[in-house]
Amino acid sequence: MKNQSFFKRMGFALQGISAAFRLESSFRLQCLAALMVLIVLCWYKPSLLWWALLLLNCGLILAAELFNTALEHLIDHLHPSLHPSIKIAKDCAAGAVLLLSLTAVCVFVAFLLENVAYQ
């Protein structure tokens, strides 16, 4: 698998994103939230700094969801039965997504407060 062409590697990445979108309702929900953020950004037309902050948050959350999905599928494949350590690993990955989501909501609220105040 090493030293594949750029387009082959990009194909693998797109297959992973596609699989997460098909299989994980959380990923689809986060994609919907990112789309809504994009629509709000297009509506308000804020400074580029707000675009960067909000899109960076969206990208981080989606990436965290992909890591979480990858971890869950790998763990479930290698060790399908319940184990306390596996539960901790899965819970920590889900917690990482939750923390990023909460911080993104805080940034979005700050964006709305600043932009509603100026209108």
Image: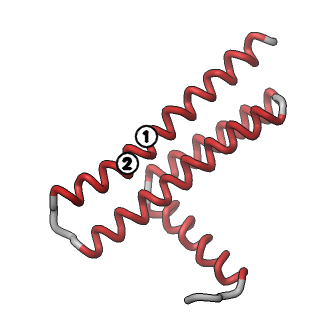
Left or right of residue 3: residue 118: right
Q: Give SS at disc 1.
A: helix
Residue 98 higher or lower than 60, as above or below: above
> Mark 1 — residue?
98
On the image, the x and y values in percent for residue 90 come to 31, 55
Name the amino acid type tagged 2.
Ala
Residue 75 higher or lower than 31, as above or below: below
On the image, the x and y values in percent for residue 6 come to 72, 81
On the image, the x and y values in percent for residue 105 come to 55, 30
Residue 108 higher or lower than 17, as above or below: above
The residue that appears at 57% across and 73% down in the rendered structure is 15
Quarter of the view holding residue 16 = bottom right
Mark 1 crowdedness (10 Å alpha carbons): few <14, some 14-19, many ≥20: some
The residue that appears at 69% across and 43% down in the rendered structure is 55
Kindly indicate whether the residue at mark 2 contacts the one at mark 1 (C-beta within 8 angstroms). Answer: yes
Name the amino acid type tagged 1.
Leu
Left or right of residue 51: residue 21: left
> Mark 2 — residue?
94
Q: CA distance from mark 1 to mark 2?
A: 6 Å
Q: Give SS at disc 2.
A: helix
Given residues 6 and 22, the one toward you in this image is 6
On the image, the x and y values in percent for residue 65 come to 48, 53
Check the image and tell me how it is coloured: secondary structure
- Of the 4 image quadrants, the one containing the C terminus is top right
